[in-house]
Image (tube, coloured by chain):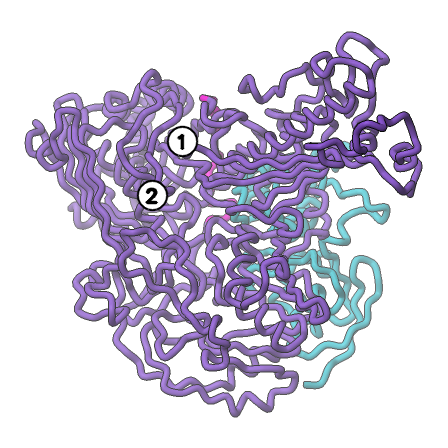
Chain colours: A cyan, B purple
Amino acid sequence: MTDIAITLTVNGVVRQVEVPGRRLLSDCLRHDLGLTGTHVGCEHGVCGCCTVLLDGEPVRSCLTFAVTVDGHDITTVEGLAAPDGAMSPVQRAFAECHGLQCGFCTPGFLCTVTALLRDNPSPTGEEVLEGISGNLCRCTGYQNIVKSVHRAAEIMAEET
Amino acid sequence: MHGEAAGGGGMTTKLFGEPVRRREDPRLLTGQGRYLDDLGTHALEAAFVRSPHAHARIRDVDVSAALDVDGLVAIYTWEDLPALLAQPLPLLIPHPALTHGRTAYPLARDLVRHVGEPVVMVVARDRYLAEDACALIRVDYEVLKPVVGVEEAARSARLVHDDVPGNVGAHLVQEVPSAAGLGAREAIEAAPHTLSFRLDIERSASMPLEGRGVYARWDADDQSLRVYTSTQTSTSVRMAVAARLGLPLPKVEVIAPDVGGGFGVKIVHPWPEELLVPWAAIALGREVKWTEDRREHFVSSAHERAQVHSVRVGFDDDGRVLGLDVTILHDHGAYTPYGIIVPIITSTQLPGPYRIGAYRVEFSSIYTNTVQVTPYRGAGRPQAVFCMERTMDHIAAHLGADRTAVRAVNFIQPDEFPYDQGLIFQDGRPLIYDSGDYPESLRMLKELIGWDSFPELKARAAAEGRRIGIGIGCYVEGTGVGPYEGGHVQITSDGRVHVSTGLTSQGQGHETVFAQIAATELGVPLERVSVVTGDTRRFGYAVGTFASRAAVMSGNAIALACRKVREKALRIAADALEADPGDLEIADGEVRVVGSPGAAIPLATVAVLSNPLRYAFDAEAARATQFAGASSFDRPPVAEGEEPGLEGRDYYSPLRSTFASGMHAAIVETDPLTAEIRILRYAVVHDCGNLINPMIVEGQIHGGVAQGVGGALYERMVYDEHGQLLNASFMDFLMPYATEVPFIETAHLQTPSPLNPLGIKGAGEAGVIPVSAVIASAVEDAEGIEIDRMPISPSELFDLRRSAG
């Protein structure tokens, strides 16, 4: 199978990689680029663990072929913190509100919520539920995740 | 807090009981977690050809077409396995009642007994290529008629295992007579009222978001093996691997890295892949890894819950149960690797918080051509509670009594503890409740949900054309089962505290709660404590994380180890400070003379003093050499009976289980047209003894209730008559999202366990246990139709309405 050279900007860094046409973006990020923070829970686009931001919009990296995003900008969970390593408001809120247990679904939630709050900085309860309703969590339920989203909105408001 | 837990001496570092933020979180929130598939970047990858048939004889395996796949490294069938590995997998819990225990071969030999059973292992340069090869392997099967459905299996027209008559793997009866010596059946016949009914629960599964996975590295020079596996029991995997690969135990290390959820399914061991992947790594002299995909998880790991229960109960005019007789058919799937723990738990936890006059329970564990059944969070208890609580509701309905009043009249009273249910529990030991306060729990729950004012609410809703109902479910949960766990604690000369336990973590926050316990016991700041779990290099003896046992078992073991270290530290510090050990306290990482400010010595220094050195490798070490200070020439540098270093190891082995308890209530609304079921309110009163970290306990409850909601309304494994699992994907096996889980209101009751030094009981499974019973009760109340089968979907409710006319 012939590999195809692609160029991605991942977390602000330009990365070049050669991948077979069938290589999933999730596998490309995790195994070719070593960014293992993006997780694969179902490989059929339902659980949301593999969610990353493609040009700022949340997408399922397990349903995306790496070659199709050649030239695009991708943010993974590793890219959410500030360049000095300080956690983003969303990350801090999840820690504060016990919004995670095993942490496997967490990167997908963090990416989803980051985009959600960018588009809607003060979502209602309904909007939060709707916003995270594409991500499964099997450990901690959703109550503290919902709380984390509201708390993140508060932190962002305080800090701007 | 339990008196002993304070560890004597006034401490300023009280962390036990505080909602301390989790220490796991920073790495998990920044993508720095290390789950199984994050390891072994350059490892070869394995994939499996799995049976597409529920029951078939393998006539031939033709691998020739696969041999040309670029990147293929090896293909293995059962015939390639060495003698030790070619045996059936271990039967882990060989209960005497399991007369016909059967386990699978690591790769199928001759016969497959469920869809998904592994037949061929392929190793290739990466998973894509391994799957390419799998797709080209031709297995010739003689398809046999499968046995599907527990009742069909019990009729035994066909057999799953030729040598298991009637498909019955196990049969067990336990009977506790009434105080007057009546058997349950006699007591029921003699009772003023009797009722009989049948209750069904469907199959569900743990479904952790991270599937299983194994990664093995063989060091040929050292002849040693390191295995990383996403397991709930790394020490036991280690023993299984050593035994089945014929390796000396000290040459095998097993590490559970970050584990993305377990909920029971990762307690099974060894999974075939946990033996095959390390064996291939040795055979090939290369690192080998296997990461399960979701479809594999559905068809080749394990499920739980499916049981049919026949209940007969006798009671008096007040609803007091005089006799209870329950017969259970347990669907065990194709194999019994984890024994009969699930039906044993159902049968023994069924009496719950009640004093049952006379109790008889009988179960048969039946083989079917479906995925094997092993414990899933709650492990048999959701079924037990569904039985007992539906029974209470039936009694109340029959008598026209309030459902909570019927429960109250049956409760074991607070002054009756320890209370012996007269049964033998899953650990082979007597089922004796340690402590609890069920009347208070009920009072708290009724207040929390507004039980007494609900009729008005219901009437108001009815006036608006809305149907709402309220339900309740009570449970007692055996937690913290033995036999033991251990803890090791070491204070190093930099003042850091290193804690390890062999028990694993799947995200429950063990790093945090164990650090809280150690920091509290040793009087050191939390930041100085590090915790390692599930790494056999650090602690080799353990049982595993299941049955809500981690905090009780490892928590107490770590506390006991800390007390040993503390006692030694005080002894050494007393020498150095020329004080009496009894006058010393440890706080903020210093040993101080009580009432003498200034007379103190850092624990770091105590650690230096504990270890007489010959060599100075840094400034601290220089202070500990044999030339550093006065020494006594009439005794050796390490006195007899002493050991160098400031460390301690201890084990906690309980007399018997602790018994956590709780009660849930819910208000549901059912749509008159669509039969959609919506949970309006959900309330939990929970008692797990002393709380180590209330924030973490709440998280456990929330997560448990969410899984329970799944079990009550959505989750089921749908098999067709051919033994095909029709919904082996997240598209079709429905788990609740945020939109399906209600806000959960919680209240805590704390009745400390008298059985352990910390006074704690387990909390891991509580949330899931009564949910099906509660929702059934509430839907029944809303609809006025008996609900005897869970989960219940809108279409099923719709059908029930139609047949109820």
- Badge 2 or badge 1: first in the primary sequence: 2
Q: Is residue B796 above or below residue B117?
A: above
Residue at 89% x, 34% y: name it. B626
The residue carrying pointer 1 sits among few (fewer than 14), some (14 to 19) or many (20 or more) residues within 10 Å by Cα, namely many
The residue carrying pointer 2 sits among few (fewer than 14), some (14 to 19) or many (20 or more) residues within 10 Å by Cα, namely many
Q: Position of residue B142 (x, y in %)?
A: 32, 84
Which residue is more in the foreground, B626 or A93?
B626
Residue at 83% x, 32% y: name it. B608
Residue at 68% x, 44% y: name it. A117
Q: Is residue B747 in the magenta section? A: yes
Q: What's the residue type where badge 1 is placed?
A: Phe
Q: Is residue A147 above or below residue B121?
A: above
Label 1, on which residue? Answer: B659
Q: Is residue B411 above or below residue B743?
A: above
Label 2, on which residue? Answer: B345
In the picture, measured across the screen, residue B300 lies left or right of residue B758, that is left
Which residue is more in the foreground, A23 or B31?
B31
Which residue is more in the foreground, B98 or B65?
B98
Element marked by disc 2 = helix
Q: Is residue B361 visible?
A: yes
State how far apart marks 2 and 1 are (Cα): 13 Å
- Magenta residue span: B736-751
Q: Position of residue A66 (x, y in %)?
A: 69, 71
Element marked by disc 1 = strand
Chain holding disc 1: B
Q: Position of residue B27 (x, y in %)?
A: 71, 47
Q: What's the residue type where badge 2 is placed?
A: Ile
Q: Is residue A33 above or below residue A148?
A: below
